[in-house]
Image (cartoon, grey):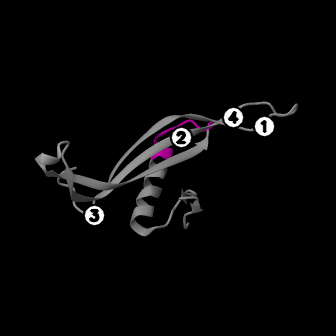
Amino acid sequence: EERKDQVTATRHSDYASQLPIVRASTGTCQSKESINNCVSVIGFKPRDVEVPLRRPAEGTRTARRQTVLIAFGMFDNSYKPDACSFNVQAADLDSILKTGESIHGEWFYRGSRAIR
């Protein structure tokens, strides 16, 4: 991470859990459902910033910071997580970072649908 340049991104992804879908149940529909969740953490655009030390008399030190995005890839739990879904999500995130557009999925950023 220390030697990362301005155009390199680091991505860490993992299947986190199955999230329950909370909904009202009726007499005819009481089956519980859930969705798979693949979390990706992407770090890019590193920069050096001055950070104050714990004791003000000691001054400051230079720390490396970066912009971080966290993406949640969610899909039906009937589909078993595998390398294909993992790679599709990775390719989509790479495309969004490079061109600003999605290839495969539907993404939302701050409550708005991303361009596809």
The Cα–Cα distance between marks 4 and 1, rounded to whole angstroms, is 12 Å
The magenta segment is 77-86
* 79 versus 5 height, above or below: above
The residue that mark 3 highlights is: 7
Q: CA distance from mark 2 to mark 3?
A: 28 Å
Q: Which mark is residue 72?
A: none
**Mark 3–mark 1 distance (CA, rounded to whole Å):** 46 Å
Vertical relation: 84 (above or below) 3: above
Please report contact status of discs 2 and 4: CB closer than 8 Å, yes or no.
no
Q: Earlier in the sequence, mark 2 or mark 3?
A: 3
- Report which residue position mark 2 lands on: 37
Among numbered discs 4 and 1, the one appearing first in the sequence: 1
| Residue under the image location 29 percent in, 55 percent down | 66
Using the image, determine if residue 21 lies above or below residue 114: above
Identify the residue at image location x=49%, y=66%: 101
Residue type, numbered disc 2: Asn
Q: Earlier in the sequence, mark 3 or mark 4?
A: 3
* SS state under label 1: loop
Name the secondary structure under disc 2: strand
| Left or right position of 4 against 40 | left
